[in-house]
Each structure stands twice: as structure tokens, then as C-alpha cells.
Amino acid sequence: MKNIKNLFLVIGVFSGLVACNDAIDIDQPGRLDADAAFQTVDDLEAGLFGVYDQFDISPDIAFQSIFTDELAIGFDNGGQGLADYGFVLNAGSTAPAVFWTNGYDQLNAANRLIEASEIVEPEAGEQARFNQILGEAYALRAWGHFTLLSYFSPDYTDDNALSVINLDFVPTIDQQLLRNTNGETFALIEEDLTRAASLMTEDNGVTRINDDFVTALRARIAAYRADPGNPSDPNWGTAASLSQQLIAKYPLANRAEYEAMFLDLSDGEVIFKLERTAGDNYDGQGATGSPAAGGWAGARFAFTGPGVDGSPYFEMGRSLFNLMDPADIRYDVNVHPSSVIDPDYQNGVGGQNNDILVVNKYQGSEGQPLMNDLKIFRASEMYLIRAEALAAQGNLGDAAALVKELRDARFGTATALPSFSNSTQAYAAILNERRVELAFEGHRYLDIKRLGSAANQGVLKDPVDCGFNGACTLSADDFRFTLPLPIVEFNANPGLREQQNPGY
Amino acid sequence: MRSKLTWILTPLLLVLSMTFSFAQEKTISGNVVDQNSVPLPGVSVVVVGTTRGTQTDFDGNYSISVAQGEVLRFSYIGQKTENRTVGVANTINVVMEEDAEALEEVVVQGYRTSTREKSSIAAQTISATTIENRPNANVVQTLSGQVAGLDISTNSGQPGAAPTVRLRGVNSINGNTAPLFIVDGTPVDETNFRSINPQDIESISVLKDAGATAIYGNRGANGVVVIKTRTGSFNTPLQIDYTGILSFSSLQNNDYNLMNSQEQLNLEAERGAGRGATLTPDEIAQAPTFNWVDFFFRTGLTQNHNLRLSSGSENFSQATTFGYFDQEGILQDSDLKRFSIRNNTTGKTDNGRFSYGTNLSINYSKSNEPNQIGGSGINRNFILGAYQSVPYITPDDYTTGADLISPLLFSNTPLFLLDRLLTYTRFEEEVKLIGSFNAAYQITPELTAAITMGGDYQSEFLTRAEGPTSFNALLFGGAENPTSGFQQQNSRRVFTYNQVTSLTYANNWGKHSVNVAGYLEYFKAHLREFGYFAQGLNPKTFYPGDGSGFITTFLDQDPDNPIDAAVLFEDEASANILNAGLFSYFGQADYDYDTRYGITGTIRRDASYRFAGSNKWATFYSVAGRWNIHNEAFMDGSVFNQLKLRASYGTAGNQRIAGGNYFTAPDLTKNLFATGAGYDNIPSIFLSQIANTTLRWETVTSANIGIDFEVFDRRLRGSFDVYDKKTSDLFQSTPVSAINSVTSLNANTGDLTNRGLDFTLNWDVIRSDDPDGFRLTLNAVGNYNETELSNLPNEEGEIIGTGRNGGRLFEYFTLRYAGVNPANGNLLFFTADGDVTENPNADTDRVWLDKNIFPDWQGSFGFNMDYKGFFLTTQFNYVTGVDRFDNDLAGFQNPDNIGQFRTSRDLFRAWTPDNRVTDIPSYDAFNRAAFASDRFLREADYVRLRFASIGYNFPRKFVEKAGISRLRVFGNAENLFTWTKWRGFDAEAQDNTSRLYPTPRTLSVGFELGF
């Protein structure tokens, strides 16, 4: 029995002395500490791909098409997106939470990379690549700020109007910041774009940011900021000259290229697009019928695939379809050939049964149905920005010529020269052209917001698409063209309640 | 069996007895009862100085072969051992007396045991009699309603599903809220009892107050459940027991009042949606009505077999159990098969100074478990198919999965799911080994050293596969790609090791007795996981779980038509390693004076790997005292047989502050980055975790006052406790501005209080001295609990989703629905000020509703009755104060579902210009889907006949001829009746998810045989 006593003693003492640290100080395998995360320029580049990955316009495509007049309820709709489709929007809605949090996810990621770059010493021969990475990060930060501003600022033309929270640093968790003004946010954006342009020297193709991205973004910003009622607004000049630079560099796609471009077989007239590929973090269905989205672009309209067999839960709105001319290549790109078109649709039993207009813009690529690259800037947008600027400045003839040039390319034949007797007519024509050209690319909601009043247009659905809920029109000056600040932010930052947008 | 043994032993005995005497062998029989004349089953009857012996049966009867002059020893736990010398009589009846030294049963106190009289803690023990023979694969489900304060709710009818277990309220918001479960000294995974055979269990003790749980330190905050499995007894001949049970399970009722085909189709025709819009009235009249509930649900058959062999010699005993359990769930494709073996041994030296025990169980289970239950996937969730499928589609409409692709119709929901039943496989296989070894050595009569080492090894193996010809594979692979589909397999192994070494000093002087113990505890856990996800299956060779049909990754890009090109079959591999550990030392001192006063003090120092980077060590303590009033001189002659006042105060910790399992949130104290796929699927580096450098334990400080009493000759027995528990340093979501890239971070802040009372009552209404007499006992247990939040981490003192200061935990905060506007059929809501509006502000008109999902009162009541061998037992569970969203009802009343899904006849009451005063809005109400509100919030209070058992114990004289010593037959029912306002299929689930798998109603028949 003596040996048993000893056994107890040995086990007791052993476990007491040795075991303690073994059980407590445990390093889990596979962890990457902050110190080790960014040490080289290669690491920074890997970090940059992490920042890019935060950028996605599938929420924009979903929200801007559902909330406006681009869509109708599809025959396979199981309740998807009905609130947005009925123009229901409040601080508890999905869209404001999504655009607010996504925007700051983007800015936070960009800021962390910019901060990390301060401790990385490029080795000989790496300086250019280092600068390029940093430049792209600044450009992404500018883009992120602009997207946030465009959804949450009530009036782009007013520098004193409230914007969003400027974020050009890595915040601490106790910070409760209030909104900056548009003037302050645009200043930060311009500063970042200037820095980006001065740092970037490389051109890595249209899926990476380069100087042309900066120019295109500046052109779009200028058009947004410019006041349609003020011909002498200097932003019109900026918009006209920047868009002209890109028009000169990026010719419009011909009809074949145009089709190939939306199948991602050709870059066509793309200035910048976000790559979407098999196995990436957006390779999936995403949130159907919701601005939360985050999946294949085409899954914003159909559950499983292109065409009538792909379970379309949204179809093209009749009012948009009625603007499409079958001779226009944009008809082929936007309307799937399996669509069932009922010329007598107004007298049919209902849009869901007899008149099936299947959205075709995102058929899929790389063998994956519905997955396509997300086009951010195309040459045609630059044409339309320039046309808008010229029309604003009173140069209605040149504006009409630019619209004709675009339409000629799409029809593959000479089209009639539009004639505008005043700027309202010109704005209306340009808005309609944007509606067709940029359909389902995440523009419609913001276009109505900034141009609708000047063009005397708002959301206008065909009666067959809104008979069931009565939500047929929405005036361009409706408060819902500015998103409310989301409740999720108020929970942490109650001071912002005082700065809620009008109407909410 | 017995007769065979007798045959073997007899010649031997004859030879022995021939040597010394001519004494005659005879058979003695008799009956053993306790001091209250209640028959005692299981009393050990041994012939002193031999290995011959037997046990009394259910009715306290025994019979044994002895020689005149031999001595019979009758022994039973908590009773004084009796000896009787065999004389000329053939009958020896024994009345056993309570052993005052060891008053009644042994009470588990945590790391040691005490007697009920000397225990100062709040605890309740239930024995095998209320656990065994129940049809639940998971023993924890069986505990429902049996222990005051133990709230058990099951939200899945999957065989073996782990219920939610909470003891005396909810002590954490994000952390673990389940009690610590200990099986034979080894802590086990509380979420996994499906592999443990309930028939092995001898007793379950639930430790409730700080006096009991402080000694478990960082794992004791939610209470402790100590499970002891059956062991053999020394000096007992081989006993063989067999139990066989057959059960039939079916779906509980609902009150949704769903439409038949004609009603559904006519409504569709009226609304111009779905098939109804295309049919003529004649066609509608002829449409069949098919109830998909009866298709996806079934009557599940369960068989349960158990064989136990136990025996013991002078210094060694063993008990071995074989179990086989095979349960079909009421949902198609769900089942559980379990095979289990347990072997427990105990041994000691001749002088008794060294003793040891081993417990080893080996369990293998295989269960088919459909996933995506509760989800909204019309092609995934069978429950959705059962409840929401339109009745005019029948299984005859199904041809192949491929045919369902075009046209793709929502109303084909049942056919998608029928296809899934045929083509989808998902099962889990599990090996679970629990082994423990314990030993104690008495160094001196006062000083004992002991060690317990235990391991819990669990290997789970998941297989799931979606066949290449399935609708889902074709749907997502594209019709062009006939070899889609996937197979996933995942292996997860967890080993935990726990070791406690201790030194105990116990002594008494006169009326003083002292017990002091020191302990050292070491815990380590290891998780290893790996798996693959393979896409692309060749239908010619595919078989679920086999890899012959795998199609390797390839890219067959047709440049002319990229959409028609073959999909890349990208396979994924995964692996994971995690380790966890705890280390503790602690002590407990216990002092008793004259069995009248007692005090126990505990202190424990704990370290957790989780807080190694912030607050590694924590200290927990408790003090508990008691006053055995009935032992005071002034109580002589009172009606009280027992009256004890207890009080305790102390702390316990919760180191699993992020919930999950041992491995969840292992290093929150670090800023972490991760590598993985980024933009364009290029490897990238990104932030994955923001450090919390002040991370610490959640601490529960609790006070408890209780009395235990037995009055009127022990006719009325019970206990009553009040408690107040406060969790501080709650690890909870603290809102942060979205500029941080997250909208909330978890931090230790705020307090949560649970206060309430527990009671347990047993009342012998009718007693009888006659073993065949009529006896009736009533019993009730109950718990009232309320939660209160305080010190919430923001200025307003309220966090949406969590609650407000002074309010309930998880209090609902939403718009209040005010009914239907008689003028136009739109929905009306209250503003925050109580005005009525059709357009409330979705932010500022929300209010706190003073309701949550947790019960106020819950417990059970019932009776036990027996007469001449017949017995009847009932247990009625009750729950009040639970408010749940009936999201199933929301679906059945949703007019936008018309044409695609089944709806309730409630919709016939919808507002029309001719029917203005109603509770159902107009189909076209503009705001029908605009606002989240309490419109579908419902009370889920219920009373349920949770368990009833009726049976008969055959008298020994009837069965003896068949060589059987005891025979019992019984019928059981679970969830037989429920009284509730809840309209859904199962009032029990404390869950707001719709389309869940309800727990079944089960009827069983079974028998027990003893040899």
C-alpha cells in the first residue's frame, strides 16, 4: 500500500507544478497577429485585395432597381422585395443599414491599409508598386465616401447640406462622430483623388484602379454636384472636360462588343469594373430581393439562372420595356430571348402570368449562371455626362449630337438627331437614355434624385406593374430619394438622431 | 437463470454442508418494508459467510434457499442493516428502520457527498425510477418538469436533439447558460447526450445555490447537474435484467385551420394568382385535397432494448449494460440508432483503506438529421413543405427532379421537397467514449487522498450529399450540367481530460465534527476537425458517402457560349485545430455541531486559457449554513419529522462568456488578421478580430434561503427556496458606430439579476401497510423566476434586442399593432404616444412591451398511485409567461402567399367593404408588409400531460415457475394532451423561428424482466 501513497503524491505534485501553464497559456495555431500581418509590399498588396473585396454594387443594383421603375414582380416572386417595391422606406429598413455599414466597412478597411503602409519600408525597386497600392487605397476611400454621400446627403448641390461622417483614420470604438457637410466630404474626396493620381503609375487592366478611374469618378462627382438650374455652375465645365478626356480614350463599343461586354467576354468600353469570379466571396446567390444582396448580380432578379427557366422573381418593368426598341442592341442585352411578350399586355390577366419580361443583363460568365463582373464606369456614361453638362450650359445642339452618337452605336445605324427646344427636354431625353443605357447597373434611383425634377420626371411604373399595391409613382422631390440614417447607427451614436434626414 | 445457478451451486453446497452437519436446505421467503410499511425493492439479502444472495422485487418480496441456522443479512442504503437467523419458520418478514447515522440517502455535494441531514446546500436529486423507460433518446429531455427551477425546452423533434437547459433563469446574455453536466466525475459536453443511454443512470442531482456551485468555480455559474450511473453492489449474486420498450410517435395537433383545395383554389381564382386563376369552377370542385403534413410526417417507431448484468463479491463489484435504441423521428428522413455498452466496476482492499472504481462507456450512434429546418428554403425545409404546401398538388404530380425545373413554380414546393427526400442524404455518426477512474486511499483514519481522472472522447462524422439527379443539383448546376450535386464529409473529434486530486481530513470530537479538503483540478480539451466539400457527381457511380462518383475539377470553357460551358467543380478542403484549458485549486471546510448547526465554506482560484491575455486568475467563494431545527429539544413531540433552515451566499463564474463550446472565442484578447480569398479570389490579408484587452469572467453572485421539511409522520415532504442571483461583468454586445466596420462589439459590462423561488412538495394522500394496499401520492414542483437588467452600457440604459435597465432580459421592443382600420382595411398601429396611425415611425414609435420569451412560472404536478401491483403515474408540466412570435401563423395569414402557399381560413374574415369590423386586414392593405410589429406575438403558456405511465407488477408466485424473478409490464405516454392558446404544433419550443420540427406525442409499451 505504500506505493499507492507514493503514486498519489507523485501525481498530485506533478500536475500541480507542470500542468498549470500547459492548460492556460495556449496559442491557437493559424493565428496572424497584427505585428506580423503587414511587413512587406507583398503583404500590402494582399491587404489591398482585402480592401477591394469590401466593394460591391450588388446592393445598389438591387435597391435602385426595386425602389424605382426598372422592375415588375416576377412570376416566381415569393414575397421578395415587396416593401421596397411599395416605396416603403424608413430608418428601420434594410437599405439604409446596408449602405451605411457597407460604406464604413470600405472606409475602415482602406484606412487600416493606409495606416499599415506607414510601417512598411519598400525595398529597392519596390517604390512604384508601393505607391500604386497606396494610390489605389486612396482612390477606393474617395469612392467609398462618394457612394455614402450620394445616398445620405439630401442635396448634392449644396455644400452646406449635411453629408456623412468623414472617415480618413482608423477610429476607436468609443468615438461618436456627427455628420460632416457636403463641402467637407467633397474636399476630402478631392484630396484623396489628387493623392491617388499622384501616386499611381501602373495600369493593371480595367479590374484595377488607375488614373482613368480617378478621372471618371471626378466626372461623375462633378455631374452630381452641378446644379441643373444653373448654367454657370463651374461643375458643369469640370464634368464636360473630364468626360471628354475619357470619351477620347475609350471609344463606344460596337454592337457585338456591347453584347460580349455584358457576358464578360470583352472589356468593350469598360473604364472600370469589379471582377467577379468563381470561388470568390461573392460567388453565391446572396440575399434575394433585398438590398443586403452580396452575390451574383443576376441573382438580384432571378433565383437560379438566366431566362424564363431561371426562376425570375423580378421581371423588367413594363414602363422600361416600352422604352426599348427591338432594333437596339440594348433590347437584346436587357431582354432575355425566352421572354413571353404580350402586345396586349394591358388587357391580360396580370403582369405575372401573360407578359414575362426576363431581365437579361447578367446572364452569367465563366460557366456560372447569373455571375457577371460589375461595371462601374463605361464610356457611354461619359457621353451622357458630357451631354448633360452641355445641355445645362445651354449647348442643346451638341448635347443632342452626343446622344445621337451613342444611339447610332447601339442601333448600328444612323438614328434621328434628337432636337431639344429647352433644357428640360434635353434633361428628359438624357434621363431616358440613361434609363435604357444604364438599366440594372445601379443608377436609376440616384439619377431621378438629381435629375428628375429638372427633367420633370419621377418614378413611373406601368399600371399593370403596380395595380396590386397602388405604388405607381414617386415624385423626384419625394424625401425618400434620400435614405434615412439607419437605426443601427443611432444605437451606438444617439447624437446622430438630431441629424436625421428630413421626412423620417 | 436462477434455477441454473442453483443447479450448479447445489452439489458444491451439499458437499460443504455434509462435512459439518446434516442441516437441511429449505426455501425462505418473505417481505421487506420500511418503517412506514412501504415495500422496499432492491434490498440486498445475503447469507452471511457465503456468496449466496438475492434482492427483493418491486413489492419487497424475496425468496432464497438456506439451511436452518444460517444468518440472513438485509441491507439497504439509508436503512439499518438487519440480521435474521433462519429457524423453523419458512417466512421471514423484515421491517427495516431508518439509519439515524446516515439519515436517508446520500446527497451529492459536488466533489464530495454528504447525508441529507448534514447537507447545507440547495439541491434536488431524482432517481432512476423517474428516468428509466421513457422514450426520449436524450435523457435531458426526460428531466423536463422534474426538478424545481430546471427549465428544459426542446425546440426540435429530431431524435436525440439537445434541449435548452437553464437552471433558475438565464444568467448570461451571450455566454453559456446551460448547467455543467458531470457524469461519474467527468465533465461532459452538455449539448451531446444523444449517445448516452438513459437506462444506465442511477441518479441525477441538480445543485442550485452558491453553497453547492462555488466549488465548481469558473464552470458553476449556471448550476451543476451530477449524473451517477449504475454500479453493482458488493456481495451480490449475478442479477440479470432486461427491458424492452416499443414506442409510437406522432405529430401534435395544431389550430391553424388551413384551407382545403377548393377553398384555396377559389381564393386563388378570386385573387388571380396561382393555379386557381387558370381553372374553371368545375375543375376546382374536382381538385383533390392532399394534406402534405401527413406526407412529410409519419408515425415514428422506436424500439429500445436493455440488458444489465450486475454482480459483486466481497471486494469487487461490476455492472454491465448493453443497450440498443432505434428511433424513427416523426419527420421523414430523421432517426437515431444507438448501440451502447457500459461497464462500471468498484473494488477495495480487505481492510477497506484503498478503494477504486472505473466507469467506461462506449457508445455508437448514427442519426439521419435533415438540415435547414426552420429555414425559408422551399427546396430545403421539409417542415415548410408539410405546413405550407398547397393541398391541390399531390405526390402523383411528381415525375423527376429535372421536370420541376421548367416551369419553376413556388407552388411546387412539396414536389421540390419530395425530390429532396429521394435525393438528399444527411447523417451523423458518432462514437462517444466516456471513461473515468477514481481511487481513494485512507492514509490515516482521518486523512484520505483521492484522485479522479476522466476523459470524454467524442468523434462526430457528418456525411451529406445532394445527388446529381436531384432537382436542387440541376437547379443550381444549370440544366446544361447533368453532373452537378455535391458531397460533404466532416470529421470532428473532441477529447477532454479532467483530473482532480484531493486530500481530505475528517474527524469528530464529541458533538463537533469537521471535514476539510483541498483540491487541485486540471482540465484540457482538444478539438481536431477536417473535411471536404466535393462538387460534381457522376450519377452512374454516385452513392452517398462513397467517392466513386466524384468528378475532378475541370474547366471546359466553350469560348462561343460561356454559359453553356461546364461548371468548374471546385472542391474545398477544411481543417481546424483548437485547444482549451483550465486550471484550478480550491478548498472546502465543513463544520457540524451535534447535527444541529452546520457551516460550510468554499474558496476556489481559477485560471482560464481564455483570459490568459487579460485577467487570467479569478477567485470564487461561498458560505453556507444550516440549522436542523427538528433536532432541537424544543421540537420533541412536534409534527415535524424534519425541519431544516438553510442559507448560502457566494459566487461562481462563467468562463464561456461567448457561449458555444469549450473552444468558442479562444483568444478575444488579441487583434487578429487573417489570410483568405479576397478580391478576384486572390489571396489577401484582412482584419478578422478587434482585441478586447479587458476581457474577464462573468461572475454570478447568489444568495439562497431555503427550508426542507417533513411533517405528519412524513406524509408531507418538501422544500422551499428563495434566491437572488446577480450576474456582473456580463459579456454583451455593446453598440459601436459603424465607422468601426462593426456595429457592435462584445465587452464585459452591465448586470443581470434573476430572482425567484423554487418549491418541491410530496404528499402521501393514502398510505397502506398492506403491500397490496392502495397508495396515492401527489407531487408538485415549481419555479418562479424574473429577470432584471441593470447598468446597460449606453446612455439611454437600453439596448434594442437585449432590454432596458429595470426591464426583462430580451424584452420585446417593437411597434404595437392596433388592428384593422374599418374604413379601408389597412393595418393600424399605435404611435409611441398611443395614437392610432397607418403610418407609424418604424424607429421612434417602437415601445418596450414588458414581455419576453422566458417563463415566469414553470414546473409540474402529478400523482403516483399503486394498488395490488398496478400503478399509475402522471406528470403535468406547466409554463406561464412565455411570449413568442407565431411566424407560422403570419405565413398562413399572409395574403401575398395566395397562389403559392397554403393559407388559413382566417383569411375568409379579411376586411372587405361589406365586412369592416374584423381582425384580418384587407388583402390589398398598402401597409400589410411595411412594418415589423407585435401583430403575431402570442402567449405560449401551456399545461401539458407531459408523461403518464400505467403498468402492472406481476406477483412473484406467478412468474417464478418460468424461472423469472420479476416481471413488469407498462404503457407510457409523452405529451399526450396540451392545453394552450398557442395555435402551432408545439407550445413547448422557446423559439421565435417558424417552421420548426415539433416534438412528438409518443405512446409506448414495454416490459421489464429480472432473472
Image (cartoon, rainbow, N blue to C red):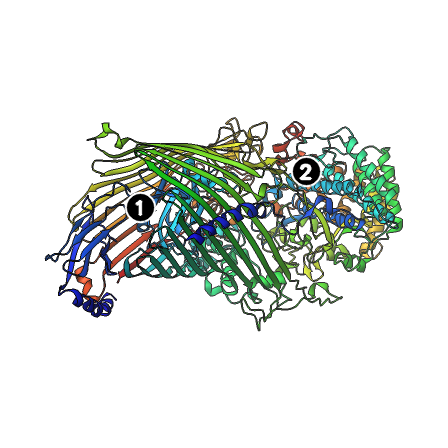
Q: Earlier in the sequence, mark 1 or mark 2?
A: 2
Disc 2 on helix, strand or loop?
A: helix
Residue B173 pos. (x, y %) = 52, 38
Q: Which mark is residue B259?
A: none
Expressed as whole percent of the image width and height from the top left, the position of residue B630 reads: 26, 32
Q: Chain of mark 2?
A: B
For residue B663, side relative to residue B355 (left or right): right
The percent coordinates of residue A248 (x first, y second) are: 89, 49
> SS for tag 1?
strand
Point out which mark residue B875 bears.
1
Point 24% across, 60% down: residue: B50
Q: Where is residue B884? Give x, y as percent.
A: 45, 41
The one of B627 and A179 positioned closer to us in this rendering: B627
Q: How many marks?
A: 2
Q: Is residue A498 left or right of residue B23?
A: right
- Which residue lies under the disc numbered 2? B740
Residue B661 visible? The answer is: no
Front in this rendered view, residue A184 or B435: B435
From the viewer's perspective, tell me whether residue A106 is left or right of residue B33.
Answer: right
Q: CA distance from mark 1 to mark 2?
A: 53 Å
Q: Residue furthest bottom?
A: B540
Residue B585 vs residue B937, the one in the foreground: B585
Which residue: 36% across, 60% down?
B321
Which of the chains bears the disc numbered 1?
B
A144 or B791, which is in the foreground?
Answer: B791
**Quarter containing the N terminus of chain B:** bottom left
Q: Amino acid at mark 1?
A: Gln
- Quarter of the figure with the C terminus of chain B: bottom left
Specify the amino acid type for callout 2. Asn
Q: Quadrant of residue B941?
A: top left
- Residue A431 figure quarter: top right
Classify mark 2: residues with Cα within 10 Å, few (<14), some (14-19) or many (20+): many
